[in-house]
């Protein structure tokens, strides 16, 4: 549950770790708020940045790379906001004049150092040959969803979509993720790769490129831009600010902090498979080998979030953002069992965001939790009514694909008229717990 980046395989190891334990840590903790079973977390090493990463750091904060000359990577991914946008806009403004509205709210760039490439299966196998995703997806068309229950491992490895970057997983590396906005007309809006290469070749970075990649690099536009994006990716991997693990929850896991009563109640509801079931997708337990939890299983869910009429593209009533199967991702357009599915993002630093879900439908954590709590039991409080007065449920998913929407995992397994799974106190306690995931 929740706002559904990065441990596609550690999802399974996290479940294994939990099954080996006698009981979840949130249940084992006594009312004092102290973790009686502290763990040793395997944290990323903090080393000086390599020369390539130092170059990437400079490029990350330099607006020179944009068509407007006024937008950098950091413009939409501010370190002060957990590499989320530094404002409450539903989508960010870009383009040549910075007046073009973006298509989706940007995801955080933090905690992606363990993100695996997009795959369909129980794990991303090591293979030198690129998999045929369409063939794999077609072979498991009837088994595209996994049951998500907090603290319980699946009965068998499910063949599910997992990994990748962006809301639809279309980028398989941080290098590729940095590359795609360069030519997007509503983002950095360069007219061509040659335009970007010309900027780099005539910039203050030219000596660094020739020293790191050889003097011929400035005469090869494709390679020059590729190496620049590689450098930005290395900065994100090497710099500790992208994965600091300095939250109160990390300290609590290690026995170095005490949760307040409200935080502890929130953790228990978060992990309760019959109530919040948040940990079913946003895994809260360390992996068996001590990797800290990233609060995502990096899989994809169709949640049926209500349509956001304020988005420019949504002014067309026939337009739908279908996530994995389009329109921005093209390779799986025929795999309709994934239509409406979007990546489950990390909840770390989540309250440093001001916009939630792929379409920015909500702007507060309270609104998000109300959606999870009421979608199935009181849909009239979530969705608008159509011209006939009927609740227009799942109104941002075409009727042909509404069967993809999750109705089996708690809290979505309830029916209209059932009591909501969460009380007002539960919701407030979960929000209080989520504050413990803030770094620093």
Image (cartoon, rainbow, N blue to C red):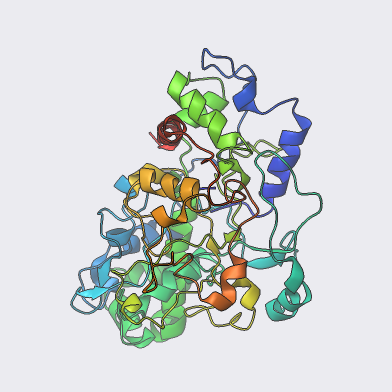
Return the x and y of residue 259 as percentages of the image width and height: 47, 21
Tell me if I can see residue 127 in this picture.
Answer: no
Given residues 308 and 431, the one toward you in this image is 308
User: Which residue is pictured at 46% across the width and 75% down the height?
Assistant: 226
Given residues 206 and 127, the one toward you in this image is 127
Relative to residue 156, is residue 361 drawn left or right?
left
Tell me if I can see residue 32 in this picture.
Answer: yes
Given residues 44 and 136, the one toward you in this image is 136
Note whether 68 is above or below 410 in the view shown.
Answer: below
User: Which residue is pictured at 29% across the width and 72% down the height?
Assistant: 65
* Residue 291 position by quadrant: top right
Relative to residue 361, is residue 310 drawn left or right?
left
Relative to residue 199, is residue 397 drawn left or right?
right
Given residues 396 and 56, the one toward you in this image is 396
User: Which residue is pictured at 40% across the width and 34% down the height?
Assistant: 435
**Location of the C terminus (image quadrant):** top left
Note whether 215 is above or below 41 in the view shown.
Answer: below
Return the x and y of residue 130 as percentages of the image width and height: 70, 76
């Amino acid at each position: 549950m929740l706002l559904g980046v990065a441990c596609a395989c550690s999802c399974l190891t996290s479940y294994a770790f939990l099954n080996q334990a006698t009981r979840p840590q949130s249940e084992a903790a006594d009312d004092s708020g102290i973790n009686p079973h502290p763990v040793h977390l395997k944290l990323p090493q903090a080393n000086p940045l390599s020369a390539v990463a130092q170059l990437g750091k400079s490029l990350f904060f330099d607006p020179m790379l944009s068509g407007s000359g006024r937008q950098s990577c950091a413009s939409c991914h501010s370190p002060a906001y957990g590499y989320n946008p530094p404002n409450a806009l539903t989508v960010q403004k870009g383009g040549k004049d910075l007046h073009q509205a973006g298509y989706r709210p940007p995801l955080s760039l933090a905690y992606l150092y363990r993100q695996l490439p997009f795959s369909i299966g129980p794990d991303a196998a090591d293979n030198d040959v690129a998999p045929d995703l369409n063939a794999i997806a077609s072979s498991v068309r009837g088994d595209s969803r996994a049951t998500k229950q907090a603290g319980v491992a699946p009965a068998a490895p499910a063949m599910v979509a997992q990994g990748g970057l962006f809301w639809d997983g279309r980028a398989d590396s941080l290098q590729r993720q940095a590359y795609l906005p360069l030519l997007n007309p509503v983002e950095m809006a360069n007219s061509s790769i040659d335009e970007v290469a010309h900027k780099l070749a005539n910039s203050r970075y030219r000596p660094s490129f020739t020293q790191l990649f050889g003097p011929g690099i400035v005469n090869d536009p494709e390679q020059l831009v590729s190496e620049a994006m590689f450098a930005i990716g290395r900065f994100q991997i090497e710099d500790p600010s992208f994965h600091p693990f300095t939250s109160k929850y990390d300290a609590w896991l290690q026995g170095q902090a005490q949760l307040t009563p409200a935080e502890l109640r929130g953790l228990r509801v978060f992990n309760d498979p019959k109530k919040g079931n948040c940990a079913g997708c946003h895994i809260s337990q360390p992996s068996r080998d001590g990797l800290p939890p990233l609060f995502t299983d990096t899989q994809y869910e169709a949640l049926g979030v209500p349509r956001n009429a304020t988005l420019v593209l949504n002014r067309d009533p026939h337009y739908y953002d279908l996530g994995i199967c389009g329109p921005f991702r093209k390779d799986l357009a025929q795999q309709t069992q994934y239509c409406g599915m979007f990546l489950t993002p990390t909840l770390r630093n989540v309250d440093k965001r001001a916009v939630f879900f792929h379409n920015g439908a909500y702007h507060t954590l309270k609104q998000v939790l109300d959606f999870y709590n009421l979608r199935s039991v009181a849909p009239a409080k979530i969705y608008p009514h159509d011209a006939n007065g009927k609740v227009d449920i799942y109104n941002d998913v075409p009727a042909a694909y509404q069967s993809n929407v999750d109705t089996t995992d708690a809290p979505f397994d309830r029916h209209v008229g059932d009591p909501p799974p969460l009380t007002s106190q539960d919701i407030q306690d979960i929000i209080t717990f989520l504050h413990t995931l803030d770094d620093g």
